[in-house]
Image (spheres, rainbow, N blue to C red):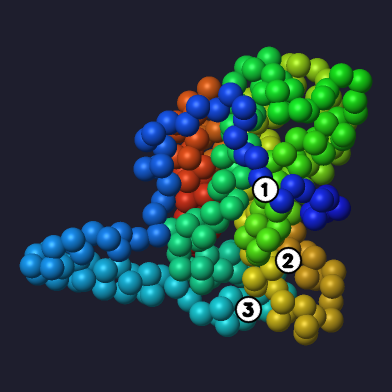
Amino acid sequence: MGTSNLYSGPKKSVLLPPDYQPNENTGSLLPTDGQQEEGEENEEDGANDSDQEEDTEQQEQKEQTASVPWSSVRRSFSHAMNNSSDRSVKSVIRKYTKALGGHTNASRQAKTAKRTAVGLLNYFTGTPDVIRARFEKAGIKFEGRPTKDILNDIFILLAPAPNDLEDSLANIALNETKADIIEDTSIDLNQLEIFNEELLQRIVGNFLKHYIFDKLIMQSEQSVLNKCDNPSRLKEIEKRIKTYIDGIVDGIVPKTVKSGIQTKNFRRVVDTLFDISYRQMEDLI
């Protein structure tokens, strides 16, 4: 699983490379948790307050309509164990996303994973020589070292400390992504040309796949595990869920993640990746 370094990372993440220049407008690209301050500055503006309350109630009704109880997700998982049709597997994924509150809320909850993905873009975008220079400036040594050791240093630099559940999920997904790259013997980080768009897309895409899948399994499977008398059947369902998630992400990443992305657009790109992935999961039929 590539999680042996889960608790060996730094206590504070360093996601931005030394040459990163923040753009004043990037903050507006992040999804917000609400607009609670709007309409509160002037108590006499009753009409505006009323309109806002109605809009909020309508939005909450929509979100409640879109969501399903977690018990329904667990029942779907149990059903898929006994009936492994494509429809039953899709139902697990769809109901799980709705139980999170729909794709918008699912994406909004992934704050640490998004920050980590932005960190990956910060370091792995650009020309090969620029990327290599960023890591070297951050203290990563390349010459004469195996790819495994180089990746360990890189991912320790990027990994969030596992202080809570979301941090841990992002940390595990990053370590699993590292394991994916290490297992590919064709990747030699001593070769400058390896730092290309294909590697960028693979790293970001695999991180997103692992995060979404790991979180789904963790939140949906516990009650099934307690009653499961057929571990091989459970593994098969997990594999099929992972196949659907991988397919969704693989369809999005090449169109969204490019080596020439401007720094000011990193957050927008990451928001798009998470939002569309969860939206397609919610819409599976």
Pointers 2 and 3 in contact (C-beta within 8 Å): no
The local secondary structure at tag 1 comes to loop
Q: Which mark is residue 117?
A: none
* Residue type at tag 2: Ile
Q: In this view, does 97 lie to the left or right of 132?
A: left
* Residue type at tag 1: Lys
Q: Is residue 90 left or right of residue 55?
A: right
Q: Pick whichever of labels 2 and 3 is earlier in the sequence.
A: 3
Q: In this view, does 200 lie to the left or right of 106?
A: right
Q: Classify mark 1: residues with Cα within 10 Å, few (<14), some (14-19) or many (20+).
A: few
The Cα atoms of the two marked residues, 1 and 3, are separated by 36 Å
* Residue 214 in picture, x, y percent from top left: 69, 60
Can residue 108 be seen here? The reply is yes
Q: Pick whichever of labels 1 and 3 is earlier in the sequence.
A: 1
Question: Which mark is nearer the camera, 1 or 3?
Answer: 1
Reading the image, the residue beneath label 3 is 74
The local secondary structure at tag 3 comes to helix
The residue at 68%/37% (across/down) is 203
* Residue type at tag 3: Arg
* Residue 134 in picture, x, y percent from top left: 67, 23
The Cα atoms of the two marked residues, 1 and 2, are separated by 36 Å
Question: Which mark is nearer the camera, 1 or 2?
Answer: 1
Reading the image, the residue beneath label 2 is 237
Residue situated in front as seen by the camera: 117 or 232: 117
Judge whether 127 appears above or below 200 on screen. Answer: above
Q: Quadrant of residue 219?
A: bottom right
Q: Pick whichever of labels 1 and 2 is earlier in the sequence.
A: 1
* Residue 114 in picture, x, y percent from top left: 56, 48
The Cα atoms of the two marked residues, 2 and 3, are separated by 13 Å
The local secondary structure at tag 2 comes to helix
Reading the image, the residue beneath label 1 is 12
